[in-house]
Image (cartoon, grey):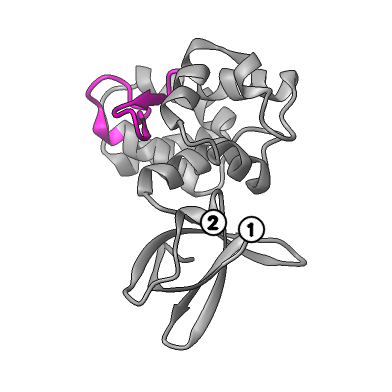
Amino acid sequence: MFNYLNGLITAVTPDYIVVDINGVGYQVAVANPYAYTESTTPTKVYIYQAVREDAITLYGFQTLAEKQLFLQLISVSGIGPKSALAILATPDHAALAQAINEGNDTFLAKFPGIGKKTAGRIIVELKDRVQVETAEMPLLVPETIGENQALADALAALKALGYTDKQVQKVEKSLATAEVMTTSDYISAGLKLLI
């Protein structure tokens, strides 16, 4: 799995950019290819790698916050990587975060492939999880319960193991009422509840 590529931008097309690293050109789909320019100095592009049975696709982002927002968007049922890129193509990410937090489904339904129903799902699943830190880019609010970092880490680990947000949210309530344990103990307890 790639985290980022640091290389020369050798091509900018309407659909993707090419990042050359030691003579190997990586085709990277980005929200706005023209935000990049061909360069003679290395450029860092944050990467999400999508693997399907018929393709391996790299999606690129200028900032880590933009990548995190993309990951949140594709976690919503009905939003694929292409739809998420279309949403991120808006230059005003602060307005996007504000629309999600205020429940403005009309704003979200304006994006290609996003209808009122999908816009509603985005709002339900991401509301209060996207926060505007600057006018430039929203940052994600980590899901934690109080000051219990061990529990927050355990919940993140369960998601990393492949459990869905809904499954983790169901066990979160039970784990939160248990006495404070180590991260490992919370993970074990969570797995017992999930299996």
Q: Is most of the magenta stretch helix, strand or loop?
A: loop
Circles 1 and 2, Cβ within 8 Å, touching? The answer is yes
Residue 119 seen in this snapshot: yes
- Residue range (magenta): 128-150
Instruction: Pick whichever, 181 or 161, lies toward us.
Output: 161
Question: Residue drawn at (25%, 27%), measured in percent from left and top?
Answer: 148
Residue flagged by tag 2: what amino acid is it? Pro
Residue 135: image quadrant is top left
Which numbered disc, 1 or 2, marks the residue that appears first in the sequence? 1
Q: Secondary structure at mark 1?
A: loop
Q: How many circles with numbers are drawn on the protein?
A: 2
Question: Residue drawn at (53%, 35%), measured in percent from left and top?
Answer: 90
Packing grade of label 2 (10 A; few <14, some 14-19, many >=20) is many
Residue 172: image quadrant is top left
Say if 171 sits above or below 45 in the image: above
> Which part of the image, by quadrant, shows the C terminus?
top right
Residue flagged by tag 1: what amino acid is it? Pro
Q: Secondary structure at mark 2?
A: helix
Instruction: Pick whichever, 119 or 136, lies toward us.
Output: 136
Question: Residue drawn at (72%, 67%), measured in percent from left and top?
Answer: 55
Task: Kindly identify which residue carries mark 2.
Answer: 33
Instruction: Pick whichever, 112 or 177, lies toward us.
Output: 112
Question: Residue drawn at (63%, 63%), measured in percent from left and top?
Answer: 57
Task: Kindly identify which residue carries mark 1.
Answer: 14
Q: Is residue 152 left or right of residue 148?
A: right
Residue 18 pos. (x, y %): 53, 71
Residue 65 pos. (x, y %): 37, 42
Say if 163 sits above or below 47 in the image: above
